[in-house]
Image (cartoon, rainbow, N blue to C red):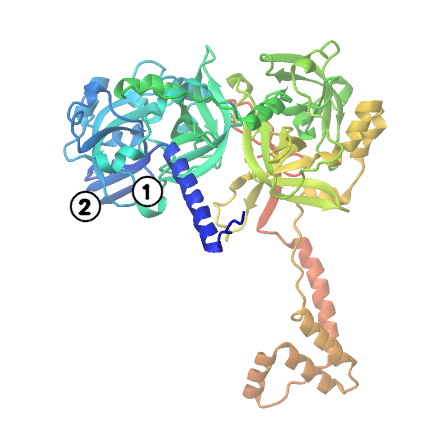
Amino acid sequence: MLRRLRTNSEYGEIQSLSVQKRIEQEASSRPLTCLVRCHGPDPNSERAKYHLLNYTKHGHTTLSASGVSFGIPSDSYNIDTDEDPEHISLIVVAHANIITPFLNYKSPITEEEIPNRLIPGTGIEILFDDTELWYPAQLLDIVEARGVMDGVQKLSQKDNETWEIGFSRGLQFADLTTPIGEFSMRNVDIAGLAILKVVLPRDKWQSKLMDNLLPNAIHPPTQGTQLLLMGSPFGILNPKVFLNSVTHGMLSNVVEGPLNEINLLMTDARMLAGYEGGVAIERHSKRFIGIIMPPLRRKNRHNVEVGLIIPALSIKQTISKYIKSQSKELTESNDEMSQLICEAKRSVVMISVKNTWASGIIISNSGHIITNAHVLYPILKDEPDITKCFVNIRIDYPYKQWINNVRVIFVSHPCWDIALLKFPDGYDYITRELSVAEIPLSSQNLEKAVSVVAIGHSIFEPSINLQPTISQGIISNIAKVNEKPILIQASSSIHNGSSGGLLLSLPPKSRPQFLGVLASNIQLSMNNSNSLLPKNENNTVIHLTLAIPCEALHDINIYLDTEDPHWLHQFEKEDPSATSIWGLEFVPPVYSNFGTTEQQQRYQRSLSAKEDDKKNSGSFFKALFPRALSAKIKERRKPLVINTKEIELQKERERKNEILNKKKLEYSNIINTRSLNGVIETDENIYISTNILYGSKL
């Protein structure tokens, strides 16, 4: 039987229809996100003071953030449109920080009074799509998400005066010092959720609404889960450009309460102002993970910012009474990649050295741990004999416990930032409960653009009792000497405490692989009056990770097999190439004294010509500066005559001056690697990063 083949146009139509169907299915499985704006009278611009996104004109201020639909209101909140055939009511949840500035605070506010405390002239509107049709919304309530304040205060408990909540500036009602207790307007900008009701045309919106996001909240997410975050950053500026934008990231850590309940989620996603109130979903299953809240950030300290998500279960417990209960099939995450990341995370331990902490990686069943040499410098200053040096190690599996008197076996000094530790005798059984990240013989996944995760105990000190934090990125570059990898540059974000952590590849079609040991990021020191940074201020680049590749650590594998210390001493040999790379030595640009290479070649040809000095000099300058020479000739009306020998003498003088000036030259931009061992806070130093081997102490 003959069958007519499809033409190209027919095949293109079928293909485009299937793509369109897939896009529609994917869009229908996503939550309905929106842009929420709140505006009202503000004669003194006080309501705009604490918000990065604001528009104030003629004594009227508008604030904006993101929101997400949670379905039809429950019966007690849906009286007006329950039987209306033309309209449908919808519950939208936004972060409370755009509503609280427009509440009347002349007398104390109780939770029941909030809807009636909006100042006269305040309006709330919601935009769902780019039609520029804003729907008026009613404020039903502001509630505090359960457990969130517990999680935030756990992270900031040691120094809550140095932390704040918000993008670029602290929010007005975000008091981290308020004791945990009942609902308080002093911290409503941290954990507050605004419950809004909006009435929409039924014929347009009925098919686009998900039944209810909340049933999925039963299954808690795991570290390493790939996330999509949807919101409207800068939406007040131009909704057509920013409405319902999407960014991505990873669930980097989980903050648990005393009963192991999940109080807060941390993410490495790079979020912008206005994302708060948006939704976080699992990237592949589209499972609801939580609502984005403003980040936790250090006061007066650049680039220390922690993305936070209110967990789905907390939201379910907080707002379920406002939403009509509907049956919906529950989905449980089956993210194989996150499970593999969690398995690799078990090989990462915390190292405590005096008042500092860092990370380490278990690399053998005998309990050997690799970390950075600079992690141990605080004790080596007092006791240079490493046989008398011991540190404390914390493992997190099967439960958190500290192991004391861990031996220091080796610490490198010249260029390789490597140290080797070992559990005390009798602790070999621990490795059976943990994962061992054996150093691979070859790194097949060590290529540019390969996805990676950095795993280490960053930012928060040991008493917070967090698991290792995870941050994703890609391999940006690989520095090599004689085709041997010396340094890995990745785009994952790391902070203090990550030193000695694990860099893991995430190839799409194979298992993750141990790629390298986290060592540092970089900081830019601008000591020039022309600098764009404030004078004498260091600027840390956290989204640039430097790691020691496993291919440079093969001699450690041989030591583990033979226990011959000779193989460790290989890392103490001087290696100028590696030292130059890891020192990020500045290579000044080379400038010729006279023009470009082509112009210099013309000059050499002119010197070789057998002509008199006058003719040679004239041809040289005409080739080198044709425009300038023509202007001079026009002005002087005479040919310019310069002796060739005089030119060479001048070159020699300039060469000597250049050598002399190099010794005196101060470069305006000095780049130093920045080690990442954390320092436990005291009254005198809050958060100090130490530049060892490559830089100076901050």
Q: Are marks 1 and 2 in contact (CB under 8 Å)?
A: no
Numbered mark located on residue 235 in the image: 1
The secondary structure type at the circle numbered 2 is loop
Task: Compare residues 651 and 434 and report the one nearer the observer.
Answer: 434
Classify 611 as above or below 350.
below
Task: Compare residues 30 and 498 and report the one nearer the observer.
Answer: 30
- Looking at the rendered structure, the kind of residue marked 2 is His
Numbered mark located on residue 328 in the image: none
Q: Position of residue 473 (x, y in %)?
A: 56, 37
Q: Position of residue 682 (x, y in %)?
A: 52, 22
Q: Position of residue 264 (x, y in %)?
A: 43, 22
| Image quadrant in which you'd find residue 545 | top right
Compare marks 1 and 2 and give the one earlier in the sequence: 2
Q: Which residue is mark 2?
A: 58
Total number of numbered labels?
Answer: 2
| Image quadrant in which you'd find residue 566 | top right
Q: Which dot, 1 or 2, sits closer to the camera?
A: 1
Q: Where's the C terminus, which quadrant?
A: top right
Residue 683 as seen in the image, left or right of residue 697: left
The secondary structure type at the circle numbered 1 is loop
**Residue found at x 66% / y 20%:** 435
Residue 8 as seen in the image, left or right of residue 272: right
The CA span between labels 1 and 2 is 21 Å
Task: Compare residues 140 and 91 and report the one nearer the observer.
Answer: 91
Q: Position of residue 657 (x, y in %)?
A: 69, 63
Tell me if mark 2 has few (under 14), some (14-19) or many (20+) residues whose alpha carbon lies within 10 angstroms of its own: few
Tell me if mark 1 has few (under 14), some (14-19) or many (20+) residues whose alpha carbon lies within 10 angstroms of its own: many
Outermost front residue: 1
Tell me if residue 218 can be seen.
yes
